[in-house]
Image (cartoon, rainbow, N blue to C red):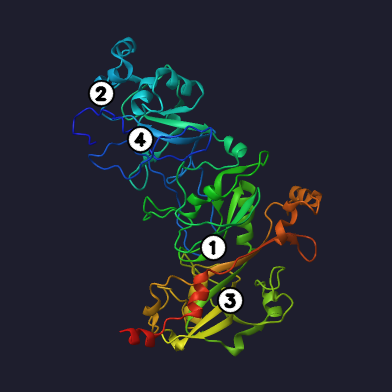
Amino acid sequence: ARARQGSVIKPSRTMTSLAAADHLPSDAPQPADSSAGPIQPGRLPYEEHTDDEGNMDDEADTTDHGNPSSSTYSDVTIINGFVVVRKLFVPDEGFDIDFAIEVMGKEQVERVGLKSDNVTLCAALMMLDRNKYPSISRARKALRKGNILVHKGPLGIDDRGRRTIFDESKCERGLVSHRVQPNDVICEQAKLGNQQKLQKYPVEKGKRPPFELPVVYQDDHFAIVNKPGGVNVLFQKEQEDNEMCIKQAAPYVLKPPVCGTLNMLHRPSPVHRLDKPTSGLLLIAKTKPAKAELVRLFTERDVRKTYTAIINGRPTEFSEHTITSSQAHDLGVDVGYFGDRNAGKDIKWQLIDHALEDNDKKTKTAVTIWRPLQCVECSKAADGVLTLVELKPKSGRYHQLRRHMAWVCKRPLVGDRSYSGEIEFKHHFRDHGLYLCSNKVTLPHPYYNTTTGRMAWDAMKDSDPRKYVGGMIRLSADKRKVLVHAEIEVPARFQKLLDSPPEVEKEQTNA
């Protein structure tokens, strides 16, 4: 249906779903359908559009982006402790009185004095969604349960030209006596506390992330997920409506903290960055104290990370930059932690101590240690070789690992479009994707190392599965810290490339 200029919009029976919505399951109000997309001239202005905020790129800390109810891009709107799960938009030309008579009957319309630009809230609900509100009693029931919120006037416009911004001063709980006017927004809402009872975060019903997001570790305070390559951590302005970032996908796979957990976040929040093409371990906070502590740990470089990458060529090694594991440990680089298979071995590493310009255009120190793990012949690669390497950054500068390998070792990562420069054969791997994976992480637990948290951890019996989580949690050597270690296998495509590297001769034979 299209709205003609100057005409009155008559909601049809097919327009029972007027907005895509963020949902609480089970007892939350459920929409009959969903649609999304930017409001365009000639298109019925009923759709709601959900986004997220932020701009993340590579390995660094991040800060809180604000309350979901006030952020420009928010996939969950919180108003006075309630989650907005659906929006119904009152047409700017008002309602068709003939349609109101069809829905409610002429006697009822005359009794309550309905006008196209001034109708009762019950009547508006019945006309906007006849399937869900087939009668006045059904609409009144929803109002008496507190399931309806009214935003007087249109929502504010966000950076993408969408009406998504709530003004809490214009919001009021819907009552049977209320009337609505053109451009008002009627919202279905659900109490936020239900998510702890249901052990589910508020998400859009019937929707799932278009990618797998395995949960490697989680408790009531934070989680570690395995981010796939090609997915942004936070929403990007160029993101398509049918895409989803990690922050939007996390509520679908994580469980909220149990009842009684203090200062829980309305939705899980990533606390550091991974570049879009980079895969691997990503830390996500579930409570405000855990988020603050995790950000502090990243700032003070107490989160130890290990990456695996495939290099296009043979990286340059310098004898004067060779160090041992003991020396790397003294530098504060990630070696010798309890999950490291090589802990206690004095392995040779290459040290890169090369300052880099960060996002703020200031040059800062940047330290990486690395070592080759495997070399395979490949006629399409520089030097005729692909090299599997292990990298351990001490600092976390913008694109640090990619720039260090390309600029200092003179060989870029396979699939790195940004720093391949003029290297020969780089075009052979242009469409392979970036071969960089964050596959190990060790950090102090953000809660169990607080005074209260340590008492709780010590009070757990050794048989309690929460205490050690299958070996992922244990005490440091000096018994002072509770550490978490997570490790994953690199994506299968890494080994596939090493086992069957592309060859120029095969291409020529096939030709």
Q: CA distance from mark 3 to mark 4?
A: 51 Å
Sequence order check, earlier mark of 1 and 2: 1
Q: Is residue 346 above or below residue 74?
A: below
User: Mark 4 sits on what residue?
Assistant: 18
Q: Amino acid at mark 1?
A: Ala
User: Mark 1 sits on what residue?
Assistant: 60
User: Mark 3 sits on what residue?
Assistant: 390
Residue at the (30%, 10%) spot, across then down? 107
Q: CA distance from mark 4 to mark 2?
A: 17 Å
Q: Amino acid at mark 2?
A: Asp
Q: CA distance from mark 3 to mark 2?
A: 67 Å
Q: Amino acid at mark 3?
A: Glu
Which quadrant holds the N terminus? top left
Whether residue 348 is visible here, answered yes or no, is yes
User: Mark 2 sits on what residue?
Assistant: 96
| Closer mark to the observer between disc 1 and disc 4 | 4
Q: How many marks?
A: 4
Q: Amino acid at mark 4?
A: Leu
